[in-house]
């Protein structure tokens, strides 16, 4: 099929767009609370739509998992971009580090489920991940500029520390998680930092 005969994708009607958003929101919440094994019928019930509506938008469980994962990354990207417009880069950087740890914990569950079904998560999220990494690098640079973050930290180090923070908070009781997460984020601060 050449470009002249390729089918044109029509935009969704307003009601279909709303239903798709409801399904995504219900799936995101269900996956965050109960993990990626939640059945599609349960997601349809939570969204207040029929199972056919879910299957029309997401023909497979994997396509829904992928859409939720990409949606979470897009939300993170929007939050980083919002943080870049605020004046206190240092404070916002550490606030966002805590947010990233929470997102990463949930993202890993979805990514693992997709990987088990043969989905290439890196390819599926490449566009948004590239933009997110660039925005995070800028937020990191600004926090370093004001002396809130060690100057030798790279965006790749930041990613590794987020993964370490997720592992650390999962290894302790829930009430200890904030304290343990703070210990990991303190590794980013210059010696003698606040």
Image (spheres, rainbow, N blue to C red):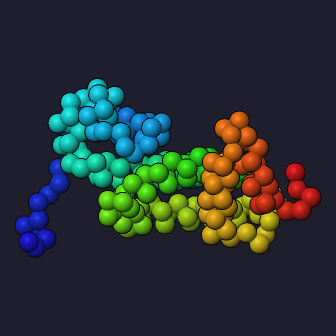
> Is residue 96 at all visible to an observer of this figure?
no
Above-or-below relation of 43 to 84:
above
Above-or-below relation of 21 to 104:
above
Give percent across and percent down for residue 177.
Answer: 70, 43
Asked whether, in this view, residue 78 is left or right of residue 88, the answer is left
Give percent across and percent down for residue 124.
Answer: 36, 62
The count of marks equals 0
Give percent across and percent down for residue 65.
Answer: 35, 49
The front one of 171 and 53 is 171
Q: Kindly indicate the quadrant of the structure image that contains residue 155.
A: bottom right
Q: Kindly indicate the quadrant of the structure image that contains residue 28.
A: top left
Q: In which quarter of the image is the N terminus?
A: bottom left
Residue at horizontal 30 percent and vertical 53 percent from the top: 62
Above-or-below relation of 34 to 115:
above
Residue at horizontal 34 percent and vertical 28 percent from the top: 46
Asked whether, in this view, residue 150 is left or right of residue 32, the answer is right
Residue at horizontal 62 percent and vertical 53 percent from the top: 166
Asked whether, in this view, residue 17 is left or right of residue 185, the answer is left
Give percent across and percent down for residue 138.
Answer: 64, 63
Residue at horizontal 80 percent and vertical 55 percent from the top: 186
> Is residue 51 at all visible to an observer of this figure?
yes
């Amino acid at each position: 099929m050449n470009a002249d005969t390729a089918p044109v994708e029509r935009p969704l009607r307003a009601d279909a767009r709303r239903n798709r958003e409801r399904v995504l929101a219900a799936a995101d919440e269900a996956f965050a609370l109960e993990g990626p094994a939640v059945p599609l019928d349960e997601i349809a019930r939570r969204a207040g739509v029929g199972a056919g509506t879910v299957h029309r938008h997401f023909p497979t469980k994997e396509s829904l998992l992928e859409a939720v994962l990409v949606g979470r990354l897009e939300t993170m990207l929007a939050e980083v971009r919002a943080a870049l417009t605020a004046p206190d880069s240092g404070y916002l950087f550490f606030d966002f580090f805590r947010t990233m740890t929470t997102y990463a914990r949930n993202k890993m569950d979805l990514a693992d489920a997709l990987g088990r079904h043969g989905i290439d998560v890196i390819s599926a999220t490449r566009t948004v991940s590239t933009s997110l990494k660039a925005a995070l690098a800028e937020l990191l640079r600004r926090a370093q500029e004001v002396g809130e973050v060690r100057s030798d930290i790279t965006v790749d180090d930041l990613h590794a520390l987020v993964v370490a923070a997720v592992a650390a908070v999962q290894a302790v009781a829930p009430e200890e998680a904030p304290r343990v997460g703070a210990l990991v984020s303190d590794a980013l601060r210059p010696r003698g930092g606040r």
